[in-house]
Image: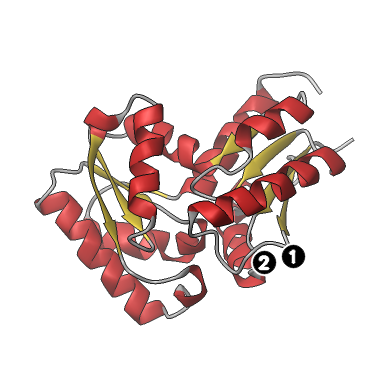
Amino acid sequence: MERRVLVINPNCSRDVTAAMSQALDRFRFEGGPVIDCVTLDDGPPGVETDRHIAEVSGLVVRIVEDEEADAYVIACFSDPGLHAAREVRRRPVFGIGGSAYAAALATGERFGIISILPVALPRHRRHVASLGLSDHLAGDIAIDLAVTELSQEDLVLERMVRAGLSLKDDHGASVVIMGCAGMARYHARLEARLGLPVIEPTRAATALALNALATTGP
């Protein structure tokens, strides 16, 4: 039987899910694990606040409980429902936030985060602190756009470039993390403009999921 990685978008935006899925095409090959991306139709348009995280955590856990897969990826940078999902399934479950931080530390000493809204910044700092990584955080800059606005390509890319250059030049970041799964479509262009490694979090988590499958039995 084919092995399966289930990537869960906790918001209801099918556009975000499609962009995530396209970013994961590099991991799809004949005979390899199936990578399925699903949308939480009952989720908010964007997971942007602590209230949103509280709302979607139970929905994420229910999907993990109901859907059979060999590994799971929670494609929200705040990793909603991660620990509860690991309780209901004895399969690998990865959050894209924690996975992105791990990938960043494997790439550089100090990482910067490009976030969507200012309300996310305290939440990111708490998450980084809970992982014991505060000394590695160079900075976190919001582009002040909601998830639903991330399809405005020229505007989004320019704001991301401006934030990334500030993280590089003003804050000393040696690697930049895209702080939202909905930013996936900008990865290659952002990396080219910054001249720094850029971590796309859904790819980082899916790579870990695939590695877990490669190193464990069916």
Q: At x 47% / y 42%, what residue is drawn?
A: 97
Mark yes or no: residue 135 visible: yes
Q: Is residue 105 left or right of residue 147?
A: left
Q: How many marks?
A: 2
Q: In which quarter of the image is the N terminus?
A: top right
User: Which mark, by number, is residue 111?
Assistant: none
User: Horizontally, is 166 left or right of 113 in the view?
Assistant: left
* C-alpha separation, residue under disc 2 versus residue under disc 1: 5 Å
Crowding near the residue tagged with mark 1, few <14, some 14–19, many ≥20 C-alpha atoms within 10 Å: some
Q: Residue at x 61, y 72 (%)?
A: 15
Q: Earlier in the sequence, mark 2 or mark 1?
A: 2
Camera sees residue 28: no
Q: Position of residue 51 (x, y in %)?
A: 55, 55
**Looking at the rendered structure, which numbered label has been put on residue 41?**
1
At a point 48% along the width and 57% down the height, the residue shown is 49
Residue on which disc 2 sits: 12
Residue occupying the far right of the picture: 1
Q: Outermost residue, front direction?
A: 51
Amino acid, disc 1: Asp
Type of amino acid under label 2: Cys
- Residue 32 picture quarter: top right
Regarding mark 2 in the picture, which secondary structure is present there? loop
Give the residue displayed 22% in from the left and 54% down from the top.
Answer: 195
10 Å crowding of disc 2: few (<14), some (14-19), many (20+): some
- Front in this rendered view, residue 180 or 107: 180
Q: Position of residue 144 (x, y in %)?
A: 33, 69
